[in-house]
Structures are given as structure tokens and as C-alpha cells.
Amino acid sequence: MTHADAKPPPNTGDLLEFLFRLGQALLACGEQTATVELALRRAAVAYGSRRSRVVAFPTIILISLHDGQEERTTFAEGPVQSLRLDQIGDVYELRDRAQRGEVPPREGIERLSAILRQPARFGTVGVIVGHIVLTAGVALVLMPGWEILVATVLLGVVVGILKVFNRDRPVLAVPLPVIAAGVVSALVFLAIKRGVPIDPLHALVPPLVSFLPGAMLTMGMVELAYGDMVSGTSRLATGFVQLVLLAFGLAAGAALVGYAPEDLVDASTRIIGSPWAVIAPWVGVVVFGIGAFFHFSAPRHSLPWMLLVLLVAFAVQQVATEVFGKAGSGFFGMLVVTPLGYLIQLRFGGPPATVTFLPSFWLLVPGALSLSSVTRMLSDREAGFEGLVTAVLVFTSIALGTLMGAALYKQLTERFGAWQLQLGRVGRYFRQSKRGKGSGDGEKQ
């Protein structure tokens, strides 16, 4: 490239705005703060800013760029909304282009605005139907009984409608989990009062699974493992507060229909099992994946990859539970799922790794286990704290599995890349030798 062909450096103000808005979007994807900082620094270098400083927390981003004459600094608040899976995929695609300097900052700003405004891929009906389906999937995994399945499907309709109603009303975003938990709890205990034989905990968790902060709590443990004490602590505190709010909503709903908090733990005396209890959880995993695909508007062609990762995660967890117990099973699940997600993204051209393994966070143990523990604290503090200790062990094991899984993928790809390089060199040597031999034979003739 000649000097005349070199691209002029972008406007520093536009670049700063693009970087902090990209950082906000990455944080809204649930990305680790250290990874956000690295991505923004790489993007700054790609746009010609060799001297940049980036500090990211879940609630604030600080960026400093030197344009050759002076240093300019800006800071912005954290993400103001959570993103669907299709938006997460688009944000990661834009991040990759920014790290290569392929999109002008002003165009990147417009693209981010378009991503945040874009409607759900399957519309309002798809969001509600998807929530019903994923609720049924969780019910099949937790307790494959027909009474539980029918009850949770009906409750899934109610919560899905509430979420759609709240979609354009950010004022209700914070109290929505409490309202949803209260409505679900009141309906469940009204049904129990009328003699419906359902276990309340197994009926209450599936409709509220999309509110459970399993991914946030696990990412908080990952942040702490990396030494990011502020980010890790803030995410853990936020996740725990969400659990407490959900538990409060459950207790309030029970109280509205004349039940005490301890009735959340055991309100039914008869639970009817299912003859197909062995295969039902596996069917539930597939059903949950399909529901998550529609409810969270996953990117195109991502459903097979999502189902693959969910099934692998569930299979590994089931085996590890039998061998090591429930508390350590998450470690082995994420040890396999994390490199699998990156492998699908980088080697097979699939969706971003976050899109494929986020549903695993929503489905598996942490969220439901910790919600049950917090709920039990309302009536039995000793049992509740014991459950919370178990939940902390689960989060820790999953966080360590995520870390080691990422490290395992990096090590394997580096070795695989080295082997590919050596094989390529050997292949080129033999091809050159063959061409040389053929040329020599021609000269002799």
C-alpha cells in the first residue's frame, strides 16, 4: 500500500463514541470486563490509535485515546438494556470487524443503534410461544410429571405475556421479576388450594427460569477468579439481589392466597411421577433449546449448534453427578461446553460462543438451585444457608470449568495450529520435490 492509498485516521471524537458504545453493547451481552477492555484496545489500535487506555466495569466504561497531539478521555454508563441472542450475534460480528478496522466509526455507531432498535426475529407471538416451550422444557428436566407440565405451560403463557407487555416500558424492568413471581406464586397456591397435586417448587421455577441470574452469578465468579474484584463482586451482589427479589415475590404471592412462606417448600402431599421419567429430561433439553431459540430470537442457523451444546452439557453433567455429586458436576459440564462453543464459532463458522453456551447457564443447576435455597431461607434458615453454600460451590465449579475450558481450547488450537503448519510445510516440500523431479525428467527427454 502506498502513502496515497493509506486510509486517513478517523475523527477522534467519533472513534471515542464508537468504542464506548461498543463497550456498552459487549457488557450488555454479559461479556467479561477484561475481555471488553482487550477488544476495545485492539479496535483502537486497528484505527491507528497506538496509545489507548480502557477500564471497564459492569456499570461504567472509561476510555482514553491519544491522537498524536493530545489525549482525549471519555466515560459512559454501563449497558441500559439486556440483549437478545440475535443482537448478541450482531454485536460480536461488529466487534470482530472493528478489531480489524473494517468499519468506519461513524458507520459503526449507526450500526449499533440499528442493532439495539431491531425487533425480535419472530415477533411478539414468537416471544410468547418460545417462552411457553422453554418453560415446558425446564419442567420436563426438573420433574417429568403431566400435572407439573400442564401447570408450568399455563404459567409460561402468563409470564410470556407479562414480558411482552413490559418490553417497551423500562420503568417496570426492575419490579417485573417481583410481579411475575408474585403472580405465578398466587396462581400455583390457588391451584393447590383447589386440590391440584403439584409440588410448588417444581411448578414455580420453570416459568421464572428466564429471570434466574445463573449466567450473571457464574460470570461474577469468573471475574473474581481473574482478580477483577470490583466487577466480580458487583455481579454477584446484583445476581443475589435478583434472587432475593424473586423469593420475595414468591412469598408475597403465597401470602395473598393465605399461605405462609414455609408452604413454598412443601405444599403438596402427592406428586405423580411419569412412566417415561428416564427419557423425559432429554426431551426436555431439546424442547428447552427450541423454546430458547424462539424466545430469545437466536441468530439464523444457530438452532442445531445450540441443541448440540445443550445436549453435551446435560450429558456431561449427568455423568459427573453420578460420579462426583451435583456440586462438582458443573465444572465438567463447562470444561467441555466452553471449548465446544469456541470450536463451533471459530472452526465451523457457527454463531458466537456466547450464543451457544448461554442457554446452558439458563438450563442447568445454578439458577434453580440457588432460588430454592433462598426460598427455603424464608422458612428454614439453617437449610437455606446450607443450600446457599452448595450453590456457591456450584458457581465456583462452573466458573473454574469455564476458565479451564477456555484455556484448554487455546492450548489445543495452538498445538493444532502448529501441527497444521508443520504438515503444510511437509506437503509443500513434497510438492516442490515432485515438481522438480518432473522438470528434471523433462530436461532429460
Image (cartoon, rainbow, N blue to C red):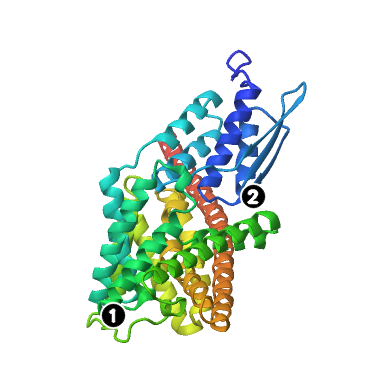
> Counting other residues with Cα less than 10 Å from the Cα at mark 2, is it few (<14), some (14-19), or many (20 or more)?
some
Q: Earlier in the sequence, mark 1 or mark 2?
A: 2
**Residue ID at (32%, 77%):** 143
Q: Position of residue 208 (x, y in %)?
A: 39, 62
Measure the alpha-carbon separation of dots 1 and 2: 42 Å
Q: Is residue 290 visible?
A: no
Quadrant for the N terminus, please.
top right
Q: Which sits in the foreground, 407 or 221?
A: 221
Q: Which mark is residue 34?
A: 2
Residue found farthest to the top: 4
Horizontal relation, residue 327 to residue 359: left or right: right
- Which residue is painted at 46% across and 43% down in the image? 170
Q: For the image shown, how many numbered marks are present on the structure?
A: 2
Q: Is residue 54 above or below residue 283?
A: above
Query: Which residue is depicted at the point 58% across and 83% down?
Result: 382
Left/right of residue 128 with respect to residue 37 in the rendered view: left
Q: Residue 437, which numbered label?
A: none
Residue closest to the eye, 4 or 362: 362
Camera sees residue 124: yes
Residue type (three-letter) at the residue carrying disc 2: Ala
Q: Position of residue 352 (x, y in %)?
A: 45, 48
Residue name at image x 27 percent, y 69 percent = 151
Regarding mark 1 in the picture, which secondary structure is present there?
Answer: loop
| Residue 406 percent coordinates (x, y) | 56, 59
Quickly name the residue at label 1. Answer: 278
